[in-house]
Image: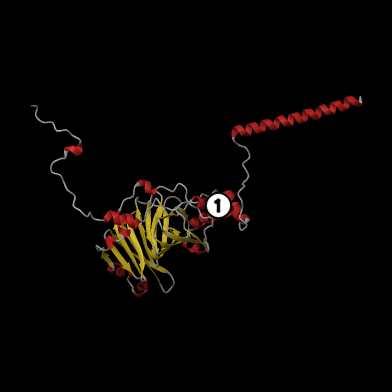
């Protein structure tokens, strides 16, 4: 009797274990068929400076980094990029984000805005890349804060309502929807030149109350305006002052490499996003930009910074690999060399043959039959 009870108990335990195993197998099978398996755990390495709140933002909101521009070097060019107190040598096709400062030391560099246009900057020059104030989430929304040098830009498309591009220098802002223009800083003056279409130039001055007031003028193609921001506070009619400074572009102005660059249309292939862009692993610094960003922009960039901090170790490994794979830039000659060769006049006058040379055309003359 005792033995029977023991056997019966063992049988019941075996049936229970068998049933549990079958249920588990069916659950796994159903999960694989429906695609509702438990999501994989986030295995990204978290930087030691990342706090719990930032990690929660990363897990809760997927962040796709969207550069404001791509820095492209011509052969022999040298530039540095600064971000959050750190500096590095510029790499070709380098992604630029909010607050990045670029100093062009030697040669010429380009800023690519995929599907939109390109900026051309000669050394010496220094500028900071910012999100433009009027931009939405999609499309181009870039502002260049020019501290020294000059930048020429050509936009091949008309920007949408939530897209914008502008160049700011001191208290002067040149904003466009789609055109070719240049902005230069020299001897305290801001010079805006327009090659195609038109540019809205805004001058800002501060009242005694501390508030800013602004006035604007529209500059058409073939014209320019040179302004000295130190004179803005001395006039009661800023718009009239700006209008008096409008002038026609001279022949010398139109020989500038930047002007020639801005007058040439781009092949569509020139505006394609780089296949393997270089991403610097240092997260952008937003503290100095908070007063310049709208609430939605600031929240978007804060999520991006959290994403970069959470994945910084992985980004540094990818960055090191890209540095090893990069070769000296040979496919992009200096723009100066290209433009000068195109503008050179022929040394000899081409000869036009009045009578076709049949031997060169490989044609046998057919005369009258004898």
Residue projecting furthest to the left: 370
User: From the viewer's perspective, is 359 left or right of 60?
Assistant: left
Q: Residue at x 37, y 48 (%)?
A: 270
Quadrant that contains the N terminus: top right
Residue at horizontal 33 percent and vertical 50 percent from the top: 266
Q: Is residue 125 left or right of residue 47?
A: left
* Res. 278 visible in picture: yes
Is 228 drawn above or below residue 338 in the view shown? below
Mark 1 — residue? Answer: 315
Tell me which corner region of the image, top left, top right, bottom left or bottom right, holds residue 208.
Answer: bottom left
With 114 as the anchor, is 5 left or right in this view? right
- Depth check: give the residue in front, 78 or 295: 78
Q: Residue 370, how many percent across, how many down?
A: 8, 26
Q: Is residue 153 above or below residue 275?
A: below
Mark 1 falls on what kind of element?
helix
Give residue 219's position: percent from left, percent from top. Answer: 29, 61
> Mark 1 packing: few (<14 Cα in 10 Å), some, or many (20+)?
some
Does 26 appear above or below 343?
A: above
Q: Quadrant of residue 52?
A: bottom right
Residue 367, given in percent of the width and then of the height, sits at: 10, 31
Residue found 40% across the figure and 72% down from its top: 207
């Amino acid at each position: 009797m005792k033995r029977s009870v023991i056997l019966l108990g063992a049988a019941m335990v075996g049936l229970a274990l068998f049933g549990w195993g079958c249920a588990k197998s069916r659950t796994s099978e159903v999960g694989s068929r429906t695609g509702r398996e438990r999501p994989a755990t986030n295995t990204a390495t978290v930087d030691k400076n990342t706090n719990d709140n930032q990690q929660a933002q990363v897990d809760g909101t997927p962040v796709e980094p969207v550069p404001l521009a791509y820095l492209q070097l011509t052969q022999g060019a040298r530039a540095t990029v600064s971000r959050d107190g750190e500096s590095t040598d510029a790499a070709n096709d380098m992604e630029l984000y909010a607050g990045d400062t670029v100093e062009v030391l030697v040669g010429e560099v380009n800023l690519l805005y995929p599907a939109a246009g390109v900026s051309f900057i000669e050394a010496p020059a220094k500028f900071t890349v910012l999100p433009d104030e009027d931009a939405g989430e999609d499309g181009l929304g870039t502002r260049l804060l020019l501290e020294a040098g000059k930048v020429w830009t050509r936009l091949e498309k008309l920007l949408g309502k939530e897209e914008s591009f502008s160049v700011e220098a001191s208290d002067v802002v040149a904003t466009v929807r789609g055109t070719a223009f240049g902005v230069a800083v020299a001897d305290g003056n801001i010079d805006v030149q327009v090659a195609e279409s038109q540019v809205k130039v805004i001058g800002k001055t501060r009242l005694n109350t501390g508030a800013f007031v602004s006035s604007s003028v529209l500059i058409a193609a073939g014209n320019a305006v040179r302004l000295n921001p130190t004179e803005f506070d001395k006039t009661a009619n800023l718009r009239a002052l700006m209008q008096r400074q409008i002038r026609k572009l001279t022949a010398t102005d139109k020989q500038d490499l930047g002007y020639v660059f801005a007058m040439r249309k781009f092949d569509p292939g020139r505006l394609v996003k780089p296949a393997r862009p270089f991403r610097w692993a240092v997260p952008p610094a937003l503290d100095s930009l908070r007063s310049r960003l709208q609430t939605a922009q600031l929240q978007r960039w804060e999520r991006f910074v959290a994403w970069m901090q959470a994945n910084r170790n992985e980004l540094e490994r990818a960055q090191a690999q890209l540095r090893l794979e990069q070769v000296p830039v040979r496919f992009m000659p200096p723009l100066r060399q290209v433009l000068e060769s195109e503008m050179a006049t022929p040394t000899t006058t081409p000869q036009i043959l009045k009578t076709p040379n049949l031997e060169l055309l490989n044609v046998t003359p057919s005369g009258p039959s004898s």
